[in-house]
Image: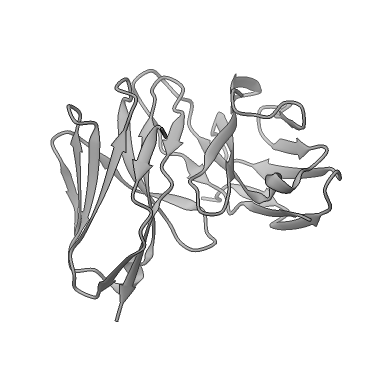
Amino acid sequence: RKEVEQDPGPFNVPEGATVAFNCTYSNSASQSFFWYRQDCRKEPKLLMSVYSSGNEDGRFTAQLNRASQYISLLIRDSKLSDSATYLCVVNRGATNKLIFGTGTLLAVQP
Amino acid sequence: EAGVAQSPRYKIIEKRQSVAFWCNPISGHATLYWYQQILGQGPKLLIQFQNNGVVDDSQLPKDRFSAERLKGVDSTLKIQPAKLEDSAVYLCASSPIARQGLPYEQYFGPGTRLTVT
């Protein structure tokens, strides 16, 4: 079993739709959590950190459920420019080691 | 602020040949990471340096892969000899020094796309 699991998609949605991505992690000692975005043939870039209290950045909302070891990302009012792969990432702690999921591909259609 | 620099951007070699990748991290970042990203997968950490010391190399195939960061700045990753399954994008990332309970964002370079034929 992979340490971080995501649905690889692809998710094909029309512009303006709301889309949700889910992710589970297996190591209960994981300390911090992130969503990274990776455009085609580009490097990953931090989208947002994920906190137990939930956090929002414009159209993006991230949520963490430590009891269920579950992380989510909600994108509202999807734009064409949101088309990318979204990587769920877990930080194991002291050494800042990141464990990446396989990524979920989002394609927003006009 | 200049980002993480990597070269070359693309490399095609035959199996059993050797290859080297170079990375220059963001100025002042003490921690440097090399990742391997195979098509359709997320990046996998190969080795992590803090200054010029190795913090984690548990997933580095040491029979063929080696990496160094001699002066605590630039780093090179070498594969010798290459296998077909080494075809991937090799990403370098850097961050400020890691401290207990205080994860720092990792900044990635553009990567080197390696094709082994």
Q: Is residue B74 above or below residue A75?
A: above
Q: Position of residue A100 (x, y in %)?
A: 43, 40
* Side of B10 where B14 appears, left or right: right
* Side of A58 where B75 appears, left or right: right
**Residue at x-position 41% and y-position 42%:** A101
* Side of B117 where B23 appears, left or right: left
The residue nearer to you, when weighing A31 against B12, is: B12
**Residue at x-position 31% and y-position 30%:** A32
Quadrant location of residue A107? Answer: bottom left
Q: What is the residue that sits farthest to the front in this orientation? A: A1
Q: Position of residue B53 (x, y in %)?
A: 64, 19
Figure label count: 0
Q: Position of residue A7 (x, y in %)?
A: 33, 50
Q: What is the residue that sits farthest to the left in this orientation? A: A53
Quadrant location of residue B17? Answer: top right
Q: Is residue B48 above or below residue A49?
A: above
Q: Position of residue A84 (x, y in %)?
A: 39, 62
The figure's colour scheme reads one colour
Quadrant location of residue A52? Answer: top left
* Side of A88 where B56 appears, left or right: right
Q: What is the residue that sits farthest to the bottom in this orientation? A: A110
**Residue at x-position 23% and y-position 68%:** A78
Q: Which quadrant is home to the C terminus of chain B?
A: bottom right
